[in-house]
Amino acid sequence: MHLPAAVSTYFTAREPQDGEAFAAAFAPDAVVHDEGQTHQGGPAIRDWWLAAKARYRHRAEPLEAREVGGKTVVRARVTGDFPGSPAVLTFTFGLRDGRITELGVG
């Protein structure tokens, strides 16, 4: 499956060593919507990612990707320390100039 480079980085980055590369995949004004919260900007998104990794110790394995309405939509199997693991979640990425501008997780 072919994923845009920034989306691939999202799924392959490992904490904490890839924190800067992970944040660099996002545009400076990027927004992430996850678990009813919004995180905006590189530092806030990196902090959200590191906190989620520490809390859930999760990994996401992309199962399929498609383009819908100008966005990259990836269904992925997520495993970790949370009720209902493993779960299949949908990640909706907005991209601009090769970087993630928006991410919704659901």
Image (tube, rainbow, N blue to C red):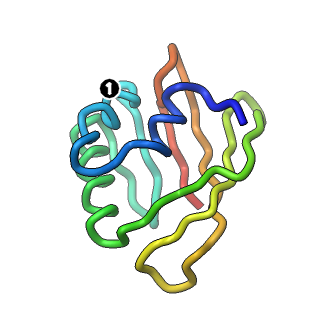
* Above or below: residue 78 compared with residue 33: below
Q: Quadrant of residue 44?
A: top left
Residue 84: x %, y % from top left = 57, 83
Q: Nearer the viewer, residue 25 or 44?
A: 25
On screen, residue 53 versus residue 69, left or right, reads left
**Along the horizontal axis of the image, is 35 left or right of 22?**
right
User: Residue lying furthest top in this view?
Assistant: 97
Counting labels gives 1
Where does residue 35 sit, x and y in percent of width and height? 45, 66
Residue in view at x 50 percent, y 37 percent = 102
Mark 1 lies on residue? 28
Q: Quadrant of residue 87?
A: bottom right
Is 94 situated above or below 92? above
Of all residues shown, which one is farthest toward the bottom? 83
Identified at 72% across, 36% down, the residue is 1
Left or right for 104, reference 3 = left
Residue type, mark 1 in image: Pro
Residue 10 spot, x, y in % from top left? 46, 41
Q: Residue at x 48, y 30 (%)?
A: 100
Query: Around disc 1, counting alpha carbons within 10 Å, would you say few (fewer than 14), some (14 to 19), or many (20 or more)?
Result: some
**Which corner quadrant holds the C terminus?**
bottom right
**Viewer-closest of 44 and 62:** 62
Front-most of 15 and 46? 15
Residue at x 59% of width, y 55% of height:
61
Residue 15 placement (x, y as % from top left): 28, 51
**SS for callout 1:** strand
For residue 53, which quarter of the picture?
A: bottom left
